[in-house]
């Protein structure tokens, strides 16, 4: 049980929006939209957000607040054996964090470089040791914030960082309005193409992006939900968080695409977009340096507040399950995450660490990133909705209950299967380049099947246990 609480509803909303809005909204969204033909993608994306992300968000926040505990203890409170599944979720989150911090470090490096006027691009940056140095800095900063606690660290950071993110985003969008390519960009982003709605690849990309972008299904929102007071309405909060997250992504698109079209760049680029494509435009545009600093500053703040939320999942679990203090648990986990992230950091450094001719970071992204997200989401649904099946939870979820109960797991399985047979575009991973999706897809699908079998075994003769009754 945790006694920590957000100091206010605004503090809670800023923290959760901080967790959700990250690299996924600003850089990955534009990359995925670009690869999926612009506005064509918008309808599936919005449908996915409201039928899957909102209910999933509500589920996690509700479970968190009802049980008032971290993800591992929450699983344990349904049934002692399920604690293992809780650790699987927390472990997945920490592994994602290990390379999310590498990318956060890149963003920080670009911010500092453009601030100092040296206008780096990806090639020279990764030919130096800077990516490793900035990985250290990003990791230390994230650990420092989490060690300061829920109110003193996470919430305080979010109340500074998130308003800044929104102000800068809107200012950049205002600047983008003055660019010659704005009309073309708006057309590209907002012209829906109903014909593509029959393309399963687009749907799978949209669902993947929505889960990723909102940080749902990872125990993050469950952990943050455990600090919410009883008076806060979680349904309105879930809708608000979702709308803000979508808004941030769309506005970021309205910043990035006008630049892309005004400078004759390719909208279909994936991972290179933020680090290669845009810097060439920044170098050429009026006030380019200011725009670059604003852009990378915004990206860094957004990434930092997401990294903090990922670490908090592990720290909350460790402090509740052991006798460690928050400071010690944070130090230990930060060190662990750092160690796990070293190979990823080295893969874009002079060492060029790679395995099977792929940078390690890409491999981890394709395996862990792709694997952990849908599996964790499935575990959360199976354990809290199916196994616990608490009456009070069902009442809290209301009309959203059938959505999390049937639709969300269905979508998760179908999207993962679609990936395996190769009709899916990049879905769960952070990086968007998808040259080698096929073989990894099979591994992911195999893994998901194994996990499903495991869940089935764990849930055998479960009976209907109420989370309330199980709670000690
Ligand atoms: N939602 C965050 C983003 O948009 C990243 C994230 C993904 C965090 C998955 C946790 C889990 O960048």
Image (cartoon, rainbow, N blue to C red):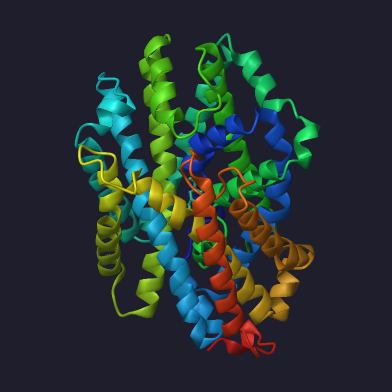
Does residue 115 sit above or below 466 in this rendering? above
Q: Residue at x 65, y 15 (%)?
A: 184
In this rendering, position of residue 94 left or right of residue 169: left
Residue 60 location (% of width, % of height): 59, 65
The quarter holding residue 413 reads bottom right
Residue at point 24%, 38% (across, down): 349
User: In the rendered picture of this protein, how many numbered marks are placed on residues?
Assistant: 0
Quick one: 468 or 192, which is closer to the camera? 192
Q: Is residue 105 visible?
A: yes
In the image, residue 292 sits, relative to residue 30, either above or below, namely above
Report x, y in % for residue 396. 71, 70
Of residues 471 and 10, the one nearer the viewer is 471
Q: Is residue 371 left or right of residue 193?
A: left
Residue at left offset 51%, top offset 18% = 259
**Residue 403, position in %: x, y?**
75, 62
Q: Position of residue 181 (x, y in %)?
A: 59, 12
Q: Is residue 204 above or below residue 27?
A: below
Q: Is residue 160 visible?
A: no
Q: Which residue is more in the foreground, 73 or 212?
A: 212
- At x 45%, y 35%, the residue is 271
Q: Is residue 457 left or right of residue 152?
A: right
């Amino acid at each position: 049980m945790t006694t920590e609480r957000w100091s206010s509803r605004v503090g809670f909303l800023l923290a959760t929006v901080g967790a959700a809005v990250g690299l996924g909204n600003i850089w990955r969204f534009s990359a995925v939209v670009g690869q999926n033909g612009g506005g064509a993608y918008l309808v599936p994306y919005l449908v996915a957000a409201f039928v899957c992300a909102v209910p999933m968000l509500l589920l996690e926040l509700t479970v968190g607040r009802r049980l008032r505990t971290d993800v591992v203890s929450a699983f344990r409170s349904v049934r002692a054996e399920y604690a293992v599944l809780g650790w699987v979720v927390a472990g997945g989150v920490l592994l994602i964090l290990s390379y999310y911090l590498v990318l956060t470090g890149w963003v920080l490096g670009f911010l500092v470089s453009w601030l100092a006027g040296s206008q780096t691009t990806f090639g020279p940056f990764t030919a130096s040791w800077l990516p490793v140095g900035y990985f250290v800095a990003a990791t230390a900063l994230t650990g420092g914030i989490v060690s300061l606690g829920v109110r003193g660290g996470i919430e305080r950071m979010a109340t500074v960082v998130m308003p800044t993110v929104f102000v800068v985003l809107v200012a950049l969008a205002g600047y983008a309005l003055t660019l010659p390519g704005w009309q073309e960009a708006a057309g590209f982003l907002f012209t829906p193409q109903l014909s593509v709605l029959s393309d399963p690849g687009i749907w799978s990309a949209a669902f993947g992006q929505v889960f990723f972008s909102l940080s749902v299904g990872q125990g993050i929102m469950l952990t943050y939900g455990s600090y919410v007071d009883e008076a806060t309405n979680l349904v309105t909060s879930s809708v608000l968080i979702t709308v803000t997250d979508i808004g941030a992504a769309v506005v970021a698109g309205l910043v990035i695409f006008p630049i892309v079209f005004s400078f004759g760049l390719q909208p279909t680029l994936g991972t290179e977009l933020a680090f290669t494509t845009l810097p060439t435009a920044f170098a050429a545009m009026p006030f380019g340096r200011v725009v670059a600093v604003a852009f990378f500053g915004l990206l860094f703040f957004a990434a930092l507040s997401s990294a903090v939320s990922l670490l908090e999942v592990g720290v909350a679990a460790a402090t509740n399950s052991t006798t460690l203090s928050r400071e010690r648990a944070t130090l230990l986990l930060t060190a662990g995450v750092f160690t796990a992230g070293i190979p990823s950091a080295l893969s874009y450094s002079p060492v060029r660490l790679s395995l099977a001719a792929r940078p390690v970071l890409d491999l981890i992204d394709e395996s862990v990133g792709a694997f952990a997200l849908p599996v964790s989401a499935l575990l959360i649904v199976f354990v809290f909705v199916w196994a616990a099946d608490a009456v009070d939870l069902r009442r809290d979820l209301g009309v959203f209950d059938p959505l999390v109960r049937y639709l969300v797991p269905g979508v998760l399985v179908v999207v993962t299967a679609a990936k395996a047979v190769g009709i899916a575009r990049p879905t769960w991973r952070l990086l968007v380049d998808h040259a080698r999706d096929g073989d990894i897809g099979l591994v992911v699908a195999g893994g998901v099947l194994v996990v499903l079998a495991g869940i089935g075994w764990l849930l055998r003769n479960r009976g209907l246990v109420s989370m309330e009754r199980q709670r000690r």
